[in-house]
Amino acid sequence: MDSSFSGNTLTLVSVGESGSTATLQVYCGSKGEPIAIYTVNGTLTWSYNASTAILTLSVTHLSPARIVVYWRFPGDVDGDGDVDASDLFDLSKAYSSEPGDANWNPDCDFNGDDRVDAADLFDLSKNYGKTA
C-alpha cells in the first residue's frame, strides 16, 4: 500500500489481483467526513463513522487501484474554500499535463489518474461557485 497526503487530499494505491477486494480504514481526525472520493482501476464503496472519525474504503481491483480522498471540493485548486475563476485559471495552465511536464499541477488532477484533462475540468465545473 502506497499513500501520500497533501493539503486536504489523501491518495492511496492498493495493489491486489484483479477481482480481489481490499478493505482499508482511515482515521480522519478533525478533518471529518470527506467531501469526495474517487477511484481509478477499481470499484469502490465507502462509509464514514462520525463518532469514531473512521473512513472505511472497500475496493475491488481491476489492477492496482488508486483511491483519492478529498476534504475540500474537487475544483478548489488553491484551497481557499471555494471553486471560482482563480481555480479555473490554475486548471487551464495545467491542462493536458502529466507528472514530469513543466505545467503539471497535482492539485488539478481531481480524480488521481495522473492527467489533467476534460474529466478534471468536468469535476471543477460541477462544483463551480460552491464554497465550504
Image: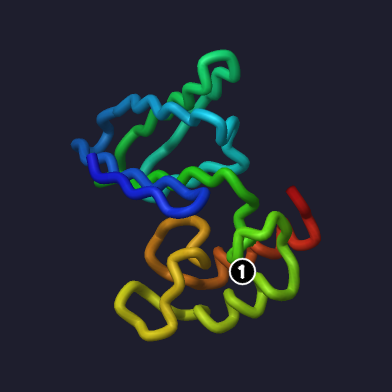
Task: Locate residue 105, reporting x and y percent.
Answer: 45, 72
Residue matched to label 1: 121
List x then y, in percent, for residue 108.
52, 67
- The relative height of residue 58 versus residue 118 in the rendered view (above or below) is above
Residue 112 in the figure: left or right of residue 128 = left
Left or right, 114 with respect to 129, comes to: left
Between residue 93 and residue 132, name the one nearer to us: 132
Relative height, residue 119 to residue 89 (above, below)? above
Residue 123 appearing in the image: no
Residue occupying image coordinates x 55% and y 83%: 93
Q: Which x, y percent locates residue 84?
A: 74, 68
Secondary structure at numbered mark 1: helix
Is residue 33 shown to the viewer in this render? yes
Residue drawn at x 44%, y 24% as measured from the top left? 56
Q: Residue furthest left?
A: 17
Side of 77 where 14 appears, left or right: left
Please tell me which residue lies in front, 37 or 118: 37
Residue positioned most to the top:
51
Q: Nearer the viewer, residue 68 or 119?
A: 68
Residue visible at 59% across and 19% down?
A: 50
Residue, x 60% and y 65% (percent of image)?
A: 78
Residue at the outermost right position? 129
Split into 4 quadrants, where in the image is the N terminus? top left
